[in-house]
Amino acid sequence: MRALPSLADFPVSFLLAVAIALGLLFGSFLNVVIHRLPRGESLVFPGSRCPGCGKPIAPRDNVPIISFILRLGRARCCGARISIRYPLVEAIGGLLSWAIMSTTILELDAETSIARAAGLFAAYLALGLGLVALAFIDLDHMLLPDEITLGGAVLGLLTVPIRPDASFTASLVGAAVGFTVIWLPFIVLYQKVRGRPGMGLGDAKLILLAGAWFGWQGALFALLAGAVQATAVMLVLLSAGAKPEEPSSVVEERRALREAIQQAEGEERAELEKELAEDPLGAEPEPGLGAARMAFGPFIALAILEFMLFGPLIRAELMGALSL
C-alpha cells in the first residue's frame, strides 16, 4: 500500500501559496463575522450585501483585496464608499495564514503526513482568524463573544491529540489558571472593593482560551504581554494628547438599557437594573485619564497570536526568567 503523501512531497512555494489564498478567502468571511456576530445575525444568510444600498454583492466584486482596488474602494451598485477595514481584514487573514504555514507547519518533520499537517494548519488558522475577528469586535463593541472565547477553548481541547507538545492535563490546568487570574482579583475582589468589576468576564474567558491552547505559560503570557502592549498604546495616545473614547455602540447600548429600565416595572425592572449594575460598562466613565476605558481584548488576542507563532522561544524565555 502506498504511503500517504508527506510535507516533503510538496514544494514550499506551493504550500505557502495555498496558505495565503485560504487566508485571504477566510479573511473576507471575517468581515461578515465582525459585522454580524455582535448583532446576533446569521453568518450564512443572507449573502454579502452592499453596506450602502443593501443589494447582494456579485462574486466578481467579492474577490479579496483585488475587488476593492479595481473598484477604487466604491460599490459597483450604488457608488457607496467601502471602508478600508474590509481589505485590511482580508490582508491580515492572508498574512496570518502565511505566518502559520512558515513558523509552524513548515517546521514540522518533513515526513509528517500531509493529512496531519493540514489538520494542524486548519486548527491554528481557525484560532488565529477567530482572534482577529474578536479583536475588531471588541474595538467596535467592547464585547468578547462566547462563540469565539469559549468556542476557541473547546477547539483547543479537541485538537490536543494532533498538536505537538500538547496534553489534556496542561490544557485543562492552563484554562483553569487563565480564568482564575482574571476572575478572582479583577472581578470578584474588585467588585467587593469598588462596587463594580474591574474587568469583564469576557477577558477571563479569553485568557482561559489561551490556557486551553498553550498551558499556564500561554495564559500568563497573554495576560502580561497584553497588559504591557495595552499600556504602551495608552501612553502613546496620551502623549499625543488623545484619550481613548468608548465606541459609539457602547454609549448607545447603555442609553437604550437605561431607557428600558425607566419604562419597565416590577421584576422586569429589577432584572434590568441588576444587568446594568453588573455590567463593567454600565456606569458612565469617570473623569480623569486614569479612568479612561480602552478595549483590552485586542491586546490579549495579539499576545495569544504572538505565543502561537513564537511559542517555543517565548516559553524558553519565560521559564528562564522564572528560574532566576
Image (spheres, helix red, strand yellow):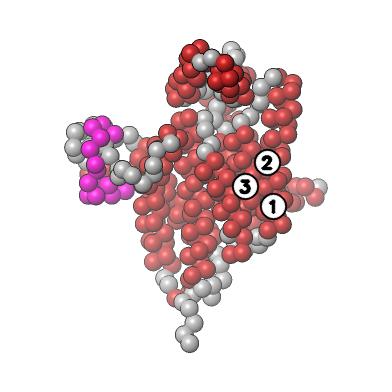
Compare residues 10 and 37 and report the one nearer the observer: 37
Residue 98, percent from left and from top: 45, 56
* Residue beneath the point at 74% across and 21% down: 193
Distance Cα–Cα, label 2 vs label 1: 11 Å
Q: Quick one: 280 or 270, which is closer to the camera? A: 270
Looking at the rendered structure, the kind of residue marked 2 is Phe
Q: Which residue is mark 3?
A: 210
- Gap between marks 3 and 2 measured at Cα: 10 Å
Q: Amino acid at mark 1?
A: Leu
Identify the main secondary structure in magenta. Answer: loop
Q: Residues within 10 Å of mark 2 (few under 14, many from 20)?
A: many
Q: Mark on residue 172?
A: 1
Residue 85 position (above or below residue 98): above
Amino acid at the residue labelled 3:
Ala
> Is there a contact, CB below 8 Å, between mark 1 and mark 3?
no
Q: Residues within 10 Å of mark 1 (few under 14, many from 20)?
A: many
Q: Are marks 2 and 1 in contact (CB under 8 Å)?
A: no
- Residue most toward the front? 266
Q: Residue furthest bottom?
A: 1
**Picture quarter containing residue 206?**
top right
Q: Residue furthest right?
A: 324
**Residue at numbered disc 2:** 179
Count of numbered circles on the image: 3
Residue 201: image location, x then y, percent: 62, 34
Q: Are marks 3 and 2 in contact (CB under 8 Å)?
A: no
From the viewer's perspective, tell me whether residue 182 is left or right of residue 143.
Answer: right
Q: Secondary structure at mark 2?
A: helix
Left or right of 28? Residue 161 is right
In the image, residue 57 sits, relative to residue 265, either above or below, namely below
Which contiguous range is marked in magenta?
51-65
In percent of the image, x 70 and y 46: which residue is there?
176
